[in-house]
Amino acid sequence: MNSFEQAILIRKDLEARIRVLERMEGDKINDMIADYAKREDDYLDIVRCMHEDYDKYKSDVAKEFKLRDHVQKRLEEHIGVLQRELILSQNIIKNPNVFGRVNENMVSTKTEEYHYFRQPAGEQHP
């Protein structure tokens, strides 16, 4: 065998090795791409779940604020009614004629006690 034939055999051997290495590297690259795609899908699922949780949290908070506003409105209405009743009762106590008429309809001890001590019945007096 001459050197030209040896060179051709060596070239064929090297080309075969290159093809084997290319296949092996191609398989590794394909495995890496598949692994990357799987991890990307996992991360996208996590992000999707986080968005769903965040949307649920936002809707729950909005419901709580709406409920709080509703409760606060009702409490303000009750406070307004109580303030008007307090003003009315103070005016009744200050006006002797009206106080006398109201006193006839109520238990006299409680109204008298409040009238004289200016504090609700049942509390300690100085």
Image (cartoon, rainbow, N blue to C red):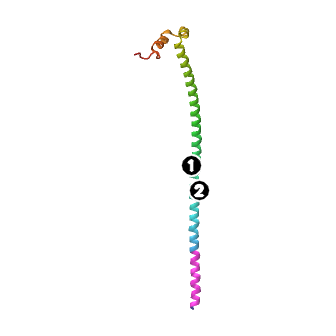
Which of discs 2 and 1 lies nearer the camera? The answer is 1
Tell me the SS state at disc 2: helix
The residue lying at 58 percent from left, 62 percent from top is: 34
The residue lying at 54 percent from left, 14 percent from top is: 92
Task: Say if 59 sits above or below 1 in the image.
Answer: above
Q: Residue furthest left?
A: 126
Q: Residue furthest front?
A: 95
- Quarter of the picture containing the C terminus is top left
Residue 61's spot in the image, x, y percent?
A: 57, 39
Residue 10's spot in the image, x, y percent?
A: 56, 84
Q: Which residue is mark 2?
A: 41
Q: Which residue is mark 1?
A: 50
Magenta segment boundaries in residue numbering: 3-20
Residue 14 is one of the magenta-drawn residues: yes
Tell me the SS state at disc 1: helix
Q: Nearer the viewer, residue 2 or 78?
A: 78
On residue 77, the disc is: none
